[in-house]
Amino acid sequence: MRIARRSSRRLVPLAMVVIGMVSVACGAADGPPALDGGTPDLHIGAAQSSAPVAGASQLVLTIANRGDGDDRLLGADTDVALAIEIHRTVIEPDGRASMRMLDDVLLPSGETVQFRPGGLHLMLVVPDERVTVGGTFSVTLRFERSAPVTRTVTVVELLDLVETSGAGGTESG
């Protein structure tokens, strides 16, 4: 009998943990809010990437949504890196900068979203030897509502990327 009581005392906290995990997982499954009606009209600016530093490269560009409907950037693909992640750099309360990975980025109608060093950006994870200063490669952006868009990315030094990432026009979708 003592053994049964000890086991049941251990099962109650374990059951509470499992129920909590299931509740969190179910809440996460709801996903981001639904997009409004209307039709997005995306215009993608010139894309640049930094030469790799510590096994990663930042990729920056601008996405202008000139339509009357929202869209969402879901991700990006390339054959020159292991993966591309969406990141946002944030300043922590202690003053340190850190990156947070995002699942997607809202592209509201009538607004422009800038992907820049030190803010919202795409991160090439383990880029290969083709990602070198002066080189180019292709990246395909995937959206919730719009068709995928492929752009040619120019590779520059990280400092050049920081200096020039605010300039440049946009190209149609």
Image (cartoon, rainbow, N blue to C red):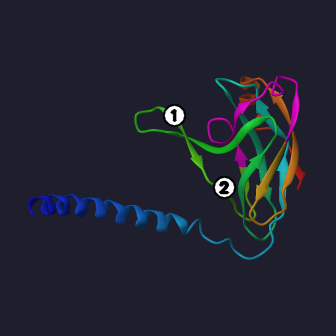
| Residue 114 coordinates in the image, percent (x, y) | 72, 47
In the image, farthest residue toward the bottom = 37
Dot 2 surroundings within 10 Å: few (below 14), some, or many (20 or more)?
A: some
| Residue 81 coordinates in the image, percent (x, y) | 75, 35
- Amino acid type, label 2: Val
Report whether 21 appears left or right of 10.
right
Tell me, yes or no, whether the two marked residues, 2 and 1, touch with CB atoms within 8 Å. no
Q: Residue at x 82, y 29 (%)?
A: 155
State the quadrant of the N terminus. bottom left
Q: Any magenta on residue 127?
A: yes
- Amino acid type, label 1: Ala
Taking 50 as reference, is 4 above or below it?
Answer: below
Task: Name the residue that disc number 1 marks.
Answer: 97
Looking at this view, is 98 or 28 the one in front? Answer: 28
Q: Any magenta on residue 25?
A: no
Q: What residue span does the magenta drawing correspond to? A: 114-138
State the quadrant of the C terminus. bottom right
In the picture, the disc for residue 105 is 2
| Residue 111 coordinates in the image, percent (x, y) | 73, 59
Taking 87 as reference, is 12 above or below it?
Answer: below
